[in-house]
Structure formats: structure tokens, C-alpha cells
Amino acid sequence: MRLAVGGYLAATNSFVAHRMDLDLFHRSTIPGEALLKAGSGGESAIAGFLNGAREHSWEVVPLQFVVPGVGGKITEEAHEATKESFLSMLRKAGPVDGVFVQLHGTAAAEHLDDCEGDFLAALRCALGDKVAIIASLDGHANVTPLMVKSASMLIGVKTNPHYDFAPVGQQAARIMAGMFDGSITPTSAWAQPAMAPALQKLFIAPGWPMEHLMRVAQNLAARHAHVLDVSLLGGFFPSDRLETGISVTVTTNKEPNLARDLAEQIKEACWAKRHAFHTDMVSVEDAVREATETEQGPVVLGDLADSGGAGTPGDGTALLAELLKQKAQGAVIGNIADSAAVQEAIKAGVGKHVTLTIGGKVDKFHGDPVQVEGRVRVIHDGVYAAATIFNAGTYRRGVTVVLDCGGIEVILTSRPTLVFEVNHFRSLGIEPTQRKILTAKSELQHRAGFAGIASKLIDVDTPGLATQVLTRLPFQKIRRPVFPLDNI
């Protein structure tokens, strides 16, 4: 059997102004044989699928892995060129029996909202109905009917933070093997409650509503031998489109009625639980006061509205301004993305005192620029390896600087970065367990990333285009009414 393997991993925050363009896509592409090397022994869905392919002695045709990450809308040129490059590679590869692609599930472009659906539909049109097409999805995917219709099967991760991509890829290989020997014919059904919850509440851990619903879904699936997969995905609310929000896709072996029945049951279970998805946020002033008055550190303050994982600029200053106002001691600003300030600090040099105006420069939504005075303590290349089993891998913050501003240390990065775990700090010579206050830019990952060391976690109602108060965002395309935007 000949199998083509590739990936298109882009996530869109519809509310930010900057665009993900073709140049970014070119710089973020792992080509051909490099894809096989990158996937060897890794934790991606592609890596898991390649392990399965080796077990079955399949011939693998590597395509490409396009990984531009999270940002604003994709330009029409970038999406169309990427789609055409995949189709061109498939034409050159010749006949294949199946295709596996790793997708995110939230990509939107200037000219269409459903990039993954468009991409899968193009693959299906080029390959015909007999070729197996299986796609993996991120836990925040906004699944659409076109995605379900175009793929033989969609398989989403079951964790959040996500750490089961490789098992999902292995599952895809097992199901594809069954499709090849005739023992499996996937039939899928999709359902969606009128819910688009904030990212904060999608944490899958005991006591959280998404964990309860995931258990309900898996227990329902376990009662039926013909169920191949249940993918209950939380959605990504900053990607404004018709289908934004929670969805469930149930895939059975030759049992379409069962798939529809289970999808509807899980949809109703989600709806019944909707009020548990109301967010729990603390004002900036109160959060900083509580953190400074807490005896035991570190207290982790979550800057969710400027999360590096939600496509925002990463230069939000609300927490920094309040920490300075309340004269906090032993605090670390997890990061502010400001390449110009980084260059000014580098020009001054390690050990030198500088006065810099930092952050709040990209737009008007993430706070005003703040002037700080401090000593340049560290200049770092910005590369570090995460210490967690989720969001694992190497992170590249761009050249990074640490400013010692008395009682507050400020990490300045050259580009927006998800801040969610201890190595982000330790790589810069900052021991997080020896600090009183840490600020993190993430949606929920920091709850798991700092669980072993944090004395307290406080999610802060900071300003930004990933605000967890969804009524502040200018939604235009999402279906209405929908919870929590509407009182239903």
C-alpha cells in the first residue's frame, strides 16, 4: 500500500489585524524527506501515523508539513498556494491508496472561513471516493460539515492541554489498515450544540466541565462495539465563523444511524452542562493585590486575553502596569513581545541600565506602552525545550532579554510566545520556585504547566483579543443565538 502523509497546521484569530502570508508559510514548511525525519520518534500525529505505517510495511510518500502556527487570517495567496502545492505533490507522487493529514481545525482565510474543509474537499476531488483520507484535529478545532463530508474520518485529540497527538496518528493507521482489508467502512455523524465557550473552561481535568463531558462521551462509545471514535472538541472562539464552538463527531463501522444517535446524545449532554462553562475571572487590580498579599509563592497570574497560543500580539501590559503601581516584589513578567525594546537592550549590553518603553505597540486592545527602568541581566537566543508532556518540543522566542527592574523582572521576547511552564523561566536563569509572582500568557495550559509548583493560580481579566468575556468581541459570522453570547 502507498500512503501519502502531510500536514497543514494553522490556527486563526479572526479579530487580530495582522495576516499570515505566503512568506510565513514558506518559512514554516517542513518539506518531503525532512518531514519523515522530523516525524521519526516525535509526538505529532504524523509521527504516530508513521509508526503505524512502519508496522504495516506501507510505502510512505512524504508531502509537506506546513506549520505557520497561530495568527490572524491567512491571505488568499497563502492558502491557495498551499492547497495547490499539496495537490501538485500528489499528482507527481502517482496513485496512492490513502492520505493522512494532520490539521488544526481553525484555519480561516481572507476569502473563506473553512480552510480545512476547503483543503480536504480539494483532496477528495483530486483523489476520488475510493482513496482513504483520514485527518487528525486539534482539541480546539471548529469542525464543519464540509470537513466531515470530505474526509473518510476525522480524529481529534482527547486531552487539553493536548498530549495525545501521536496516539491519534497511530489510531488513524489502525483504522486505515482496516479500510484496506475491508473490515472497516467508516460512517460519521456531526452534531453541534449552540455553545461557543471561552478557552479557560476547556481544561480537561477533574472537576472541570469538559472532563465530565469527555467521560460521558467515552462511556457512551464504550457500550457499542461498532464505534470507531468519538471526537468531542471544544472549539476556538477567536476564530469567528458559523461553526465556532463545541462539536462532536462520532464515527462507527458501517452503522450510520448509531453514529447519528450518539452524536445527538452527546450534543444534548453538552447543552445540559452549558452553565458550567461560565468563566471565572478576577480583575487586574484585585488579582495583583491578592498575589502580593499571599504569603506562599509562587502565585501564577494568567494573562489569558493576550495568550501566545491565541494569536494575539503578546505585548499586553496590564499586569506589568498594575504590578508597578502596587510596588510588587519578587515578580516576573512571563514575557512581553517587543522586538524593538529587545534591540535597544542588546545595544546597551549586559549589566547596563536602560530606560525603555515596552509593550502596547501593536494595537489598542492590549494596554498602553509602559516605561521601565532596569538593568539588562540576560541576553538569550530564545530557544528552549518545554518540560511538559503536552505542548512539548522546542520553542523559539527570538532573541530574548531579561530586565531586572528592582522587585520586578521583565522578560522581553522578539516574538509572541506561549508562556505556560517552568523551563520558559529556567532557561533564562530564573528559578520560578524562588519567585513570589509569575505571569503567564496562555489560555489554560499554565494550570497544568505550573501545577507542581504554584501555591495559587489566578486567571486575570486582562484586556485583549483573546478575552474570555466573549461579549466584548465583535462577532459577525458565528451562528446566533449561541451560549454564552446570548442568554439561552
Image: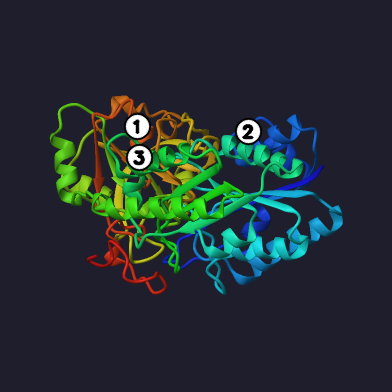
**Residue 473 image position (x, y, % from top left):** 32, 67
The quarter of the rendered structure image containing the N terminus is top right
Return the residue nearer the eye: 237 or 94: 94
Name the disc covering residue 450, or none.
1
Query: Which numbered disc flags the more N-terminal residue, 1 or 3?
Result: 3
Query: Is residue 28 shown above or below 227?
Result: below
Q: Residues within 10 Å of mark 1 (few under 14, many from 20)?
A: many
* Kind of residue at disc 3: Glu
Name the disc covering residue 42, or none.
2
Query: Which numbered disc flags the more N-terminal residue, 1 or 2?
Result: 2
Name the disc covering residue 129, or none.
none
Q: Nearer the viewer, mark 1 or mark 2?
A: 2
Q: Residues within 10 Å of mark 3 (few under 14, many from 20)?
A: some
Q: Image quarter for residue 21?
A: bottom right
Q: Which residue bears the numbered disc 3? A: 211
Q: Nearer the viewer, mark 3 or mark 2?
A: 3
* Secondary structure of residue under mark 1: loop
Q: Residue at image x 47%, y 36%?
A: 222
**Residue 76 image position (x, y, % from top left):** 62, 71
Residue 67 visible, this orientation? no
Return the residue nearer the eye: 162 or 77: 162
* Kind of residue at disc 2: Gly
Q: Residue at image x 56%, y 62%?
A: 20
The answer to whether mark 1 and mark 3 are in CB contact below 8 A is no
**Residue 309 image position (x, y, % from top left):** 44, 49
* Secondary structure of residue under mark 2: loop
* Secondary structure of residue under mark 3: helix
Q: Is residue 55 left or right of residue 43?
A: right
**Residue 384 image position (x, y, % from top left):** 52, 34
Query: What colouring method underlies this structural image?
Result: rainbow
Return the residue nearer the eye: 254 or 199: 254
